[in-house]
Amino acid sequence: MDWGNGIYITATRPYEGLANFFSARGTDLNRLFFIDCISQHLGISDPSIPSNVRYVQTPTMLEFVSLYADDALRTRDPSFVILDSLSSLLIYNSEDAVRKFLHALANKMRQKGIKIYIISMEDKHPASFFVFCDEIVDG
């Protein structure tokens, strides 16, 4: 199945681990643009930063996540965005900050017809966040 190009925003797993995971499953990493919010926060450095990866210093810097997502929208023509995860962003940010970030991201993507897949641990987010979802999948 060809999903097209995508944006993967991670506040849970460092890029290196995700790259290994996806590569082992035959995913073409050049089709994904990664915004890694956790590696630098954990002190993990990548001396050779791939062109499809942007590192955000800490998960609290949501404005940089937005800027990098905007850049990827202009340059990568994505058909989907994966946010991994809402639960992790809520560890580092206030509910209000995450709600504003999610609202802006969801509106941008809806305007362009881009699907957003939001990963979250069950019961680790306010019920009010469901307004951003068209569908909820358990599993």
Image: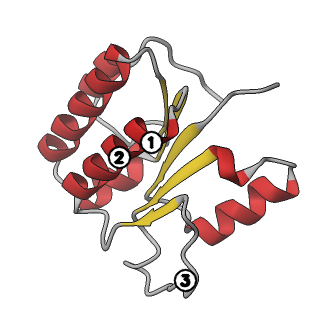
Look at the numbered disc 3 and give the secondary structure of its residue: loop
Q: Residues within 10 Å of mark 2 (few under 14, many from 20)?
A: few
Q: Amino acid at mark 1?
A: Thr
Question: Of all residues shown, which one is farthest toward the left?
Answer: 96
Tell me: 25 left or right of 21.
right
Q: Amino acid at mark 3?
A: Asp
Residue 124 in percent (x, y) is at 39, 43
Residue 54 in percent (x, y) is at 43, 63
**Sequence-wise first label, 1 or 3:** 3
Q: Nearer the viewer, mark 1 or mark 3?
A: 1
Residue at position x 57%, y 38% in the image: 6
* Pointer 1 residue: 75
Q: Residues within 10 Å of mark 1 (few under 14, many from 20)?
A: few
Look at the numbered disc 2 and give the secondary structure of its residue: helix
Residue at position x 44%, y 14% in the image: 113
Q: Residues within 10 Å of mark 3 (few under 14, many from 20)?
A: few
Specify the quadrant that holds the C terminus.
Answer: top right
Residue 51, quarter of the rendered image: bottom right
* Pointer 3 residue: 46
Residue 135 in percent (x, y) is at 50, 13
Q: Amino acid at mark 2?
A: Asp
Could you tell me if the residues under marks 1 and 2 are in contact, i.e. CB atoms within 8 Å? yes
Q: Tag on residue 71? A: 2
Residue at position x 54%, y 50% in the image: 33
Specify the quadrant that holds the N terminus.
Answer: top right
Residue at position x 43%, y 58% in the image: 11
**Sequence-wise first label, 3 or 2:** 3
C-alpha span from label 3 to label 2? 21 Å
